[in-house]
Amino acid sequence: MSEYRAGFACFVGRPNAGKSTLTNALVGQKIAITSNKPQTTRHIVRGVVHRPDSQLVLVDTPGLHRPRTLLGERLNDLVRETWSEVDVIGLCLPANEPVGRGDRFITGELASLKATVIAVVTKSDLVDKATLAKRLVEVSELGDFAEIVPVSAVAGDQIDTLTEVMTRYLPPSPQLYPDHMITDEPEHVLMAEMIREAALEGVREELPHSIAVLVEEVLPEDRVTKVYADIYVERPSQKGIVIGQGGSRLKEVGRRARQDIEELLGTKVYLDLHVRVAKDWQRDPKQLRKLGF
Ligand SMILES: Nc1nc2c(ncn2[C@@H]2O[C@H](COP(=O)(O)OP(=O)(O)OP(=O)(O)O)[C@@H](O)[C@H]2O)c(=O)[nH]1
């Protein structure tokens, strides 16, 4: 058997290029939460493609965008950091749209990295052969790619080929994750998202981006898991909105979030929620760090 290879990869590309659908197709199933192992990377693992002689670990990156707040800048830094740490990058370019300025911008940003860049021409099922051929030529002129692979995640075309091509550029390495692990998105992040969702329910208009949630502590006990979390708002007036008349809203938020978390953990959950004001947390580096950005 050939030498065992393992490493990290991510898909990049403009919005709607088909990155998420492709990740799911490669991993072969909807991302499942199967493990609470500590993360071996700081990045969110979207899925692991296991093969007898390789392990391809797909990590997530938010898109690059024009930063308007400190949060935006941090996210861009995070994107660049991920790009500089993966072994293989799949640049997704939809077959049914001409190569554009956004694609040229991203290609330029990728050029200086050590990672191998593979151009992935997505959604091949949406075009005829002649159009696909034309697009492949355009893409070959766009940049200096290690390989160009047309795929259709929806039709399942060339998905195995893409996995093989990406794996070829991974370094020789021991196995990075246990055999059956598909994703290790940390549970406390998922719990925080569930609480945030519940807290925004019905008040999204009033508090669009002003809420952040931090899970402070998770204590598994015999029959119940205790979860302590803080809901951060930016202003005292927003605190009132989240808590509601006599605490009625917060109680409802807790009830909904607890149901979701019980489903996630498969145990009974005691959820302790506090609402705190962190003034302008989106613009404060210390607060941002605390909240995981
Ligand atoms: N016909 C077809 N549609 C696809 C294919 N892959 C993705 N799509 C569709 O294209 C749209 C965008 O796909 P996503 O996977 O969400 O794209 P994305 O790049 O992750 O998008 P952002 O999260 O906005 O960056 C969805 O409506 C998908 O169903 C494909 O292979 N064939």
Image: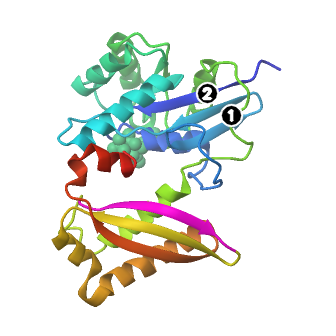
In percent of width and height, residue 192 lies at: 44, 61
> What is the quadrant of residue 61 in the picture?
top left
Which quadrant of the figure contains the N terminus? top right
Residue 212 magenta-drawn?
yes
In this image, 139 relative to 43: left or right? left
* Residue 24 appears left or right of 290: right
Q: Contact, CB < 8 Å: mark 1 with mark 2? A: yes
Look at 63% across and 54% down and name the residue there: 36
Instruction: Give 205 or 138, whichever is nearer the viewer.
Output: 205
Distance of mark 1 from mark 2, alpha carbons? 8 Å
What percent of the width, then of the height, locates residue 18?
41, 39
Seen at 65% across and 49% down, the residue is 37
| Disc 2: which residue | 7
Which residue is farthest right? 1
Name the residue type under label 1: Leu
Decide: is 137 above or below 207: above
Amino acid carrying label 2: it is Gly
In magenta stretch: residue 140 = no
Task: Write down the quadrant of residue 224 in the picture.
Answer: bottom right
Q: Is residue 275 visible?
A: yes
Q: Please, what is the dominant secondary structure of the magenta stretch?
A: strand
Q: Give the range drawn in magenta.
A: 210-221
Q: Is mark 2 on a helix, strand or loop?
A: strand
- Residue 147's place in the image compared with 16, above or below, is above
Question: Circle 1 — which element?
Answer: loop
On screen, residue 280 versus residue 21, left or right, reads left
Determine which residue is flagged by label 1.
Answer: 176
User: Residue 50 location, x and y as percent?
Assistant: 69, 37
